[in-house]
């Protein structure tokens, strides 16, 4: 391809509202065009890069025996109603009707459709396991699309689904996909972590996310300083916290008392409580009051006040808390937690600032696991201006509305649950997510198979996603520099660009054209920059677009030399003009192998 004939609308100015470097570069380098909030056109360079990433992913998926299909972008709403997600997914699910008033959704994910395929054709355990995947457009009606392709409403995703006759076989496939995803990240040259995660609206268990480490990442990760442990903040765990050993300001023990009420006028915060009793917050019980919002489509839509109790030196993690609350309910399901107002707290019969897990009537509450069997604690007395000293939590463990769960937010400095080393925060961009769905969808949608005894069983499912379009900004957030895009070894926008310094110099043009034609004939993905532009302008575009490497045909050709520049690091060297063809071919063959 000759660059003079290509449609590459590069921009000099940084587009307004483009905050992230990746968003700015993709727009400026002519990869994408924004046409609406969270909606982008992929221009020739963008489509080429998307195809490169798609091919790499397809190769790895095919290598593990997955088979590619293509499902409809528009899905009948009745399938989502069967699974129960039609009323659960929320406003991100774009619902629409056709001219006959039939309801449809634009697929944000395809668990329902793939389960429908499976139940239509799978009859026997002899047809299992089966792994199907697609690389296709998705749509999620994001409330706040931002950061370019990082959080767009319309995007391309690789979503795969596996079907099994046993959980052991699901575990085998899950591990195999994890390794394939690791190879994808490594081939792209990404610095990444595989972390434990919450399954979210898709459901299931055994959830792992693939996170590209980047300071602009929207996800906060908890990673170990010593071992490979990592988790999204909403799913992170820690080693059990021990009582403080250093004397500190207030000592290492709570006051000795036997379940006594103390007058604590105006002491409404953990800080003031610790100051009042001269104790460490580890020995206090903090109440976090939330308003739990029920499913909007449910008959009893509305909200309930719920109290979550943690140690005074901990914080409550909302996703964990919401999951724990839903785990205690058989019928009522909650979709969100919101801050409860003072009026809502008081209407529930609670005394703000003096709430404790003792004698609560008619209010749901959950205690963090770290409070199980805790002794000599200080908690609110559920009475204005009073706290109780000497609380033994195990004494009210048998109350019907008392539940324990891991609901704390892991903090930096907490200890790794695997090796005991310190934990720290990192920022990450989620580019992949894998789940063990189990029987969540097959049970709801009656997708069964006959086992070796002839008995009908629910299909056991796995789910595996990669954000294909999101990989473009993820690569750039790690690799780009002040001059423009850097794609690295894994995916090249072209193998090489030949830049003619002066197209009016017949010797330069003749050599560059001959080299271009010979490389093309050898299957090298080469582009010839034959534009009638200043040399500096061409070099700026080379840096901005991020061509893998450039061969500069200029004045040095008079001495049978041309300049080779690798885009990553802008490494330069002179090579013999006569050996340029072999050098480029050899380098490309090494990369392929």
Image (cartoon, rainbow, N blue to C red):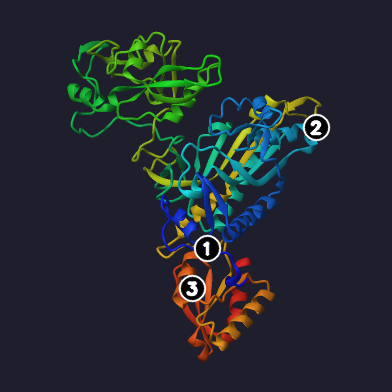
Q: Name the residue at the front extreme.
A: 99
Q: Position of residue 223 (x, y in %)?
A: 42, 44
Q: Secondary structure at mark 3?
A: helix
Residue at 24% in and 22% down? 254
Circle 2: is it few (<14), some (14-19), or many (20+) Cα within 10 Å? some
Q: Position of residue 573 (x, y in %)?
A: 47, 79
Q: Secondary structure at mark 2?
A: loop
Question: How far is mark 1 from mark 3, CA to CA?
Answer: 13 Å
Tell me if label 3 and label 2 are in contact, CB under 8 Å.
no
Q: Is residue 535 left or right of residue 440?
A: left
- Residue beneath disc 2: 123
- Residue beneath disc 3: 538
Query: Foreground: 107 or 269?
Result: 107
**Quadrant placement of the C terminus:** bottom right
Judge whether residue 95 can be spotted in this image.
yes
Mark 2 vs mark 1: in front:
1
- Residue beneath disc 1: 9
């Amino acid at each position: 391809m000759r660059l003079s004939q290509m449609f590459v609308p590069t921009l000099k100015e940084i587009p307004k509202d483009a905050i992230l470097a990746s968003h700015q570069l993709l727009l400026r380098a002519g990869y994408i065009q924004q046409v609406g909030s969270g909606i982008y056109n992929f221009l020739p360079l963008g489509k080429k890069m998307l195809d490169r990433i798609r091919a790499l992913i397809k190769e790895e998926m095919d290598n593990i025996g997955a088979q590619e299909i293509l499902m409809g972008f528009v899905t009948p709403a009745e399938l989502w109603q069967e699974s129960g997600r039609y009323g659960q997914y929320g406003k991100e699910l774009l619902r629409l009707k056709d001219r006959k008033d039939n309801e449809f959704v634009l697929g944000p994910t395809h668990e329902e459709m793939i389960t429908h395929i499976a139940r239509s054709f799978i009859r026997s355990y002899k047809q299992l396991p089966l792994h199907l995947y697609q690389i296709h457009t998705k749509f999620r009606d994001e409330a706040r699309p931002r950061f370019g392709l990082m959080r767009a409403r319309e995007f391309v995703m690789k979503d795969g689904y596996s079907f099994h006759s046993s959980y052991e076989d699901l575990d085998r496939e899950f591990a195999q996909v994890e390794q394939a995803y690791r190879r994808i990240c490594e081939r792209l040259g990404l610095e990444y972590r595989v972390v434990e995660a919450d399954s979210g609206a898709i459901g299931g268990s055994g959830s792992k996310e693939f996170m590209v480490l980047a300071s602009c990442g929207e996800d906060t990760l908890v990673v170990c300083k010593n071992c490979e442990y990592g988790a999204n903040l909403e799913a992170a765990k820690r080693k059990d916290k021990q009582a403080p050993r250093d004397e500190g300001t207030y000592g290492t023990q709570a006051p000795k008392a036997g379940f006594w009420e103390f007058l604590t006028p105006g002491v409404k915060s953990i800080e003031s409580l610790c100051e009042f009793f001269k104790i460490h917050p580890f020995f206090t019980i903090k109440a976090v009051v939330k308003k739990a919002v029920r499913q909007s489509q449910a008959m009893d839509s509305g909200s309930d006040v719920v109290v979550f109790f943690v140690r005074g030196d901990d914080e409550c993690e909302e996703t964990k808390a919401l999951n724990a609350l839903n785990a205690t309910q058989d019928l009522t399901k909650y979709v969100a937690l919101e801050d409860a107002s003072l009026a809502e707290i008081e209407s529930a019969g609670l005394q703000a600032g003096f709430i404790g897990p003792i004698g609560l009537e008619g209010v749901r509450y959950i205690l963090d696991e770290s409070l199980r069997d805790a002794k000599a604690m200080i908690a609110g007395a559920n009475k204005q201006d009073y706290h109780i000293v000497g609380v033994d939590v195990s004494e009210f463990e048998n109350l019907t509305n008392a539940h324990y769960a891991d609901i704390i937010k892991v903090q930096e400095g907490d200890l790794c649950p695997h090796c005991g080393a310190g934990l720290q925060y990192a920022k990450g961009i989620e580019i992949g997510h894998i789940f063990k769905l189990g029987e969540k969808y097959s049970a709801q949608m009656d997708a069964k198979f006959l086992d070796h005894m002839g008995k009908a069983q629910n299909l056991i499912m796995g789910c595996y996603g990669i954000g294909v379009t999101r990989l473009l900004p993820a690569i750039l957030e790690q690799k780009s520099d002040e001059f423009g895009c850097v794609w690295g070894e894994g995916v090249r926008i072209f193998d090489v660009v030949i830049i003619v310094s002066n197209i009016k110099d017949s010797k330069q043009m003749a050599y560059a054209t001959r080299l271009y034609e010979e490389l093309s004939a050898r299957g090298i993905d080469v582009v010839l920059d034959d534009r009638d532009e200043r040399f500096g302008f061409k070099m700026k575009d080379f840096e901005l677009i991020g061509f893998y490497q450039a061969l500069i045909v200029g004045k040095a050709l008079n001495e049978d030399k041309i300049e080779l520049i690798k885009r990553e690091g802008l490494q330069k060297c002179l090579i013999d003009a006569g050996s340029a063809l072999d050098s480029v071919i050899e380098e490309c063959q090494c990369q392929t192998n």
